[in-house]
Image: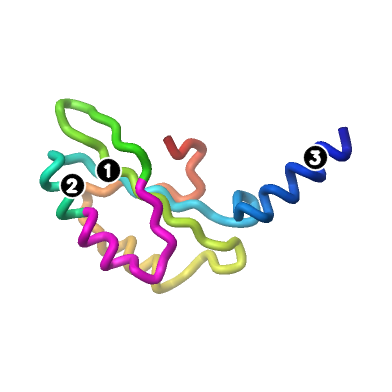
Amino acid sequence: LKGFFLRVGDERVRLGLPPHSTFILLRTLGTREVLAKILEEMKKLFVEETLHVLPRKTRQNKEILSLLIQKKSTEWPDEVLSEKLRRLPPSWQIEVAPKDIL
């Protein structure tokens, strides 16, 4: 049992998973065309970050764009990134250390 937990811990370090990193989840709702434009803008805005595009879901006949930023635990909080997040329009839902990313 101890070996299992050591292997899992090593994998979490290798993959940069919590608690060795902090996830920041960004979500917004829109049509496919609008979200495609928004995604390109977000890639430019967060060019310095590792930005993962998560699988899209639909709600209320619109799609949900979910983006995940992964920061090393030693790099968070990050004032520059925090300021960028604060400047996002209110249509964005922002979660730091979300319980669920899907």
Q: Which residues are magenta?
A: 39-53
Q: Rate crowding at label 1 as few (under 14), some (14 to 19) or many (20 or more) other CA atoms within 10 Å.
A: many
In the image, 8 versus 26, the foreground residue is 8
Please tell me whether mark 1 sits on a helix, a strand or a loop: strand
User: Quadrant of residue 66 in the image?
Assistant: top left
Point 57% across, 62% down: residue: 72
- For disc 1, the marked residue is 65
User: Quadrant of residue 28 in the image?
Assistant: top left
- For disc 3, the marked residue is 5
Please tell me whether mark 2 sits on a helix, a strand or a loop: helix
Residue contact between numbered discs 1 and 3, judged by CB atoms under 8 Å: no
Q: Amino acid at mark 2?
A: Leu
Q: Residue 41: x percent and y percent?
A: 21, 61
Q: Residue 38: x percent and y percent?
A: 19, 54
Q: CA distance from mark 1 to mark 3?
A: 34 Å
Q: Residue 74: x percent and y percent?
A: 61, 67
Which tag, 1 or 3, sits closer to the chain's start? 3
- For disc 2, the marked residue is 35
Q: CA distance from mark 3 to mark 2?
A: 40 Å
Quarter of the picture containing the C terminus is top left
Q: CA distance from mark 2 to mark 1?
A: 7 Å
Point 61% across, 49% down: residue: 18
Point 39% across, 73% down: residue: 80
Q: Amino acid at mark 1?
A: Leu
The image's colour scheme reads rainbow
Image vertical order of residue 29 relative to residue 45, above or below: above
Q: Rate crowding at label 2 as few (under 14), some (14 to 19) or many (20 or more) other CA atoms within 10 Å.
A: some
